[in-house]
Amino acid sequence: MRRPGLWLAVGALTAGIVLLGAAGCGSSSGGSGSVGSSAPGGQSNVPHVNGGTLKVAAHGDIDFIDPALAYYQTSWQVEYATCVKLLNYPDKSGDAGKVLTPEAASAMPTVSADGKTYTFTVPAGKYKFNTGEPVTAATFQHALERDLSPKQASYFGATFLNDIQGASGYKGLPAHVSGIKVTGDKLAITLTEKDAGFLSKVATPFACAIPKDTPINSKGVQSIAGAGPFYIANWVQHRSLVLKKNPYYHGPRPRYLDEIDYNQLTIDQNQGTLELKNGQLDYCPDCVPGSENFQLNQEFGPDGTSTKQTGNQRFFITPAAIISYFALNTARPTFKNPLVRQAVNWAIDRPAIEKPYGYGYGTPGDKILPPALPGSQFEKSMYPVTSPTSEDISKAKALIKQAGVKTPLTAIEYSTAGTPSVSQGDAVLTANLAKIGITVKPKYFTRALQFQNEGTKGVAMDIANEGWIEDYPDPYDFMNILLSGENIPKTGGNNFAYFDVPKYNQQMDHANTLSGNARYQTYGNIATDMMKNDPPWAPWLYTNNIDFFGPKVGCTVDTPSYIMDLTTMCLTK
Amino acid sequence: MALLEVRDLKTQFRTDDGIVGAVDGVSFSVDPGKTLAIVGESGCGKSVTCLTILGLNPRAKTISTGEAIFKGRNLLELPPTELRKVRGNEISMIFQDPMTSLNPVHSIGKQLREAIQLHNNESKAAASKRALEMLKAVGIPRAETRLEDYPHQFSGGMRQRVMIAMALINNPDLLIADEPTTALDVTTQAQILKLMNDLQRDFGSAIIMITHDLGVVAETADEVLVMYAAKPAEQGTYSDIFYNAHHPYTWGLMRSLPRLAQHGQELRPIAGSPPSLLRPPPGCRFHLRCPYAMEVCRTTEPEFAPVEGTAGHRAACHLDEATKKREAETLVAETMASTG
Amino acid sequence: MVRYVIRRLLWAVVLFIAVTVVTYIIFFMIPLDPAKLAAGKSATPQEVKAVAHRLYLDRPIYQQYLHFLGQLVFHGSLGYSFNDRQSVNSSIFSAAPVTASLVLGGAVVWMLIAVPIGILSALRPRSALDRASMVGVLCGISAHPVWIGLMASYIFGYKLNLLPIQGYCNLRGGAAGQPCGGPVDWFTHMLMPWIVFAILYAAIYVRMIRANVMETLNEDYVRTARAKGAPESIVMRRHVLRNAMLPVVTMLGMDIAIALGGAVLIEEVFGLPGLGNLAIQSVYQFDLPKIVGVTVFASVLVIGFNLLVDLLYAWIDPRIRLA
């Protein structure tokens, strides 16, 4: 998803991936949890109690609880605890948490010979909603058709599922989509073309199991039953949310708490941090303002003073699948020449641009695929991720000369208004590029206006100061969406580099048909090739998730897709 | 037997600049049913004298000594609860500016009833009836409809009548009127003064009339006290003052009255202005403005002594009797001539 | 009096129309495509067009305004939020009681502080109490409410753990599994916000009441009342305060109206989900219907209260009523 502005960014800056340094526990989570010391992943050796109520708040609010509409990170975090899906991610951190495993489906689906049909076996009643209603194959048919119904106005349905056969032109429930068929306990989904990323899409909360009587409501339903370890017992929009144990859940996922209470869904960050410090609050996914990071890390980080005393680490910095980059507009003269774009990547001082954002904000990098994303391990890094040396600068200048362009070049940069760290970062960029003969002229807009302008074809912009958060853990979400020439509409596009190289377009289309390691490796290689020869961007940072817990919380696991896992959390003795 | 006997009344105010002696030794008496006029320039202490008698000065700033014997009690020494029973009941006071002396947010009926009910245990109906009677007595036309009207619906003259009604409603023995007609036009003034005279006759109350206007004194007074700079200058009956004045200040006051027959001639004010009461001049307080001032006037305060051959007529002046008599006669002749 | 009321009512209607027109123009003339905002982040051009049509955004602006006005006047509806798709009415009506709790409770607190102190200071000018209260007033006016609020919540909420650091609980809550609610929770959560909110206003009102009372004490009719033999208690109540508090009553009405529009700073510091908070969020999210809705609602409140205050003043001051 797009990197949203101040408000949403703060609320959404928490797609977590790998616990920095903490061991991912390999063992599967034990559901019966007695008072013990081994908790899945994260904090081991923390004695915990079963039951209890967790007090949670959020700064960024929860947008919807309707799976067809919910899109905020905080909403997805809740849905990870309340939903059952055909396939799901394990409650583990690190690589172990990236492996799709069957949940409501009895096994991974069988794929037809032409690769376009996926068949899932969904044993009826393996999972039940908190109302007692059983989850069946028809449950998921209903969920997907609801997403595709035009009256539901689901963003996901409109964009991600439109390659299901019969999706375009579908009038909506109660009619059926021709490409989704249920026979007995078998659910068969037929696509119009091969899409190896399809399984990841089906594991997003948009495809959660929902009760068969969930009505179409373009405003979003205000209450919904859940078949996961927890269910949503009560929701007052913008104010409070209560999760309770689903009495009908007997699956393998962990569950220690009785209840999770969200009060104050738009808590002020400073106040939230205070409440976490003195225990009036147990958890908040986005409460820590950047200025507090250093201090909190000193006290509650892995080597913190308090951690040493209590053995309970409360402050976590975890790289996320979020990238900050400067898109270089290839459709305009300044950055038409690939050599010029390579020069930019040699010249920028990535750590210096990061500095205004505060301690622990992110990890400087030069890859298209963030380290937390599968496929990133296959992409090679080649530009300086520390401050460029004088040789690096000379190399950049030489590339400019080689390109044969007349300096100084002018680059109009579109950036976000109202955030001092952004403008300070732009100042560093300007200084960096001035050294190699490029004059940067920043122009500031509010976030919404910035998107709109950047996404309009023909816009007079050379650099877009942008960011992107993964929608689901697959390189397609970064590469095809952001860098394929087939994704350049007249307005509302996301390909801000206006990158349209037929060779790469074809390669990315092909990569999308592969699966497993081959898929990731291919994407990694394409990314390497791009950055080496024809870099569309100057990537500079992968943002970290910052999590701070109250004194009583333990058993925390930071999952790749859904940040801190609510189901594994427990209260310590 | 005098109704009110004031002896050596002194009042001082504590101010930021020091102590101001607003009244410095005033004595007089008022007989039942009679009118005493207290005359003088602004700031001479005439109002303060009466406010002191009723205890209406700001308590924190005021130091009062002397006696004000009323019905056998010294009002200056009465505890506040007792004094309140006297105010508005046995001694009433009306003030100079009728436009601001009534509470604008209460009807006059309510304010009249308040005057009654503060001192009597009457029901609202009985009080209203009485209020209505008083309004009629003071000459308010269509009094029934106007009882519940508000002060701003009355003219200045009407409001002063209401004030008088309010003051007399409990049939007080003494009415103190502090420049009641100063803020009114001449015809209204005449009406009010006539009203007061009539009411005095009907109700039998004594009146202390404070004024700076000798014309008012002429119309109403039985006894007159002339004050200057917080001290008494001259005191006597109406004829004593008008036909036999024995103080240069009194002469000056009378000469400064504009006369009808002197059309076109300049007015003759008393030169200069009253002295500061914070640091009064030594000797006679009037000496700086007195055309007859002598050496002794600068150093020694004149005694407020009785005029030769009288008991009630007093003046505070060093001039000899002969000069005074001659001046008094000259003045009378001038007055006769100019009104002829 | 009747003419006065009618004149005031007509004027209120004119003001209302003026405010809605200006708000509408401002927000819909900004260089942002509302249809695109409503349609969502990655909507296709066709979807944007469909949304534009559904929201009347493809009609001329005066038609849009008339539709908006019609919806407002005849259906009482302020439209639907772009972000959370809920009716703006429901957002406002769930935020309004929070702000009302803050402002009305705060008004009670500030009057409880200001009236006695103001009166006593006026009765004893230059005394120790008077000087102390004037120093207090200076501090109350000078110290920024945000600073006071943060200090209060830090000391009493965080350090001493006496009161909740922030947040709001419904007065009638505690129902259906909500995390907090009921009169006790409501009170403990509102106590600090009330006091912090009241401090600034109490300071202003102490000064005003003191000045008014001092002035009124010098009025001739007060002297008349004393001359009539009234005891100090009646003089104070019926004559001094009855007049001195007149302007205070009308100021109170105006201040409450303005504060209802959004006691923004206090709501932000204490995390109260009221109208001020709603206004800020809707600006961050660029949610045009909510922004317009809050503006219109706040304006209506101010206009309405203004009218009420005018009528009230006419009722309590006979000089206006019978003029």
Image (tube, rainbow, N blue to C red):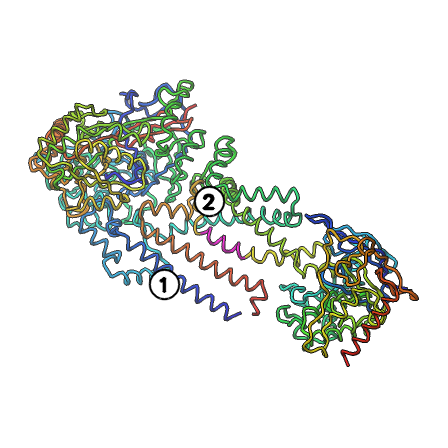
The answer to whether residue A460 is above or below residue A349 is below
Q: Amino acid at mark 1?
A: Phe
Q: Find the residue positioned furthest to the right.
A: B309
Q: Is B155 within the magenta? A: no
> Which residues are the magenta region?
C250-260
Location of residue A310 (image quadrant): top left
Q: Amino acid at mark 2?
A: Asn
Instruction: Please say whether residue A86 is visible from this viewpoint.
Output: no
Taking the image as shown, residue A184 lies to the left or right of residue A75, namely left
Residue A450: x, y in percent? Answer: 24, 44
Taking the image as shown, residue B185 lies to the left or right of residue C148, namely right
Q: Nearer the viewer, residue A199 or C205?
A: C205
Instruction: Please say whether residue A448 is visible from this viewpoint.
Output: yes
Cα separation between marks 2 and 1:
30 Å
The answer to whether residue A422 is above or below residue B44 is above
**For the N terminus of chain A, which image quadrant?**
top left
Location of residue A128 (image quadrant): top left
Q: Which mark is residue C74?
A: 1
- Residue identified by numbered label 2: C170
Q: Find the residue positioned furthest to the bottom.
A: B340
Mark sitting earlier along the chain (2/1):
1
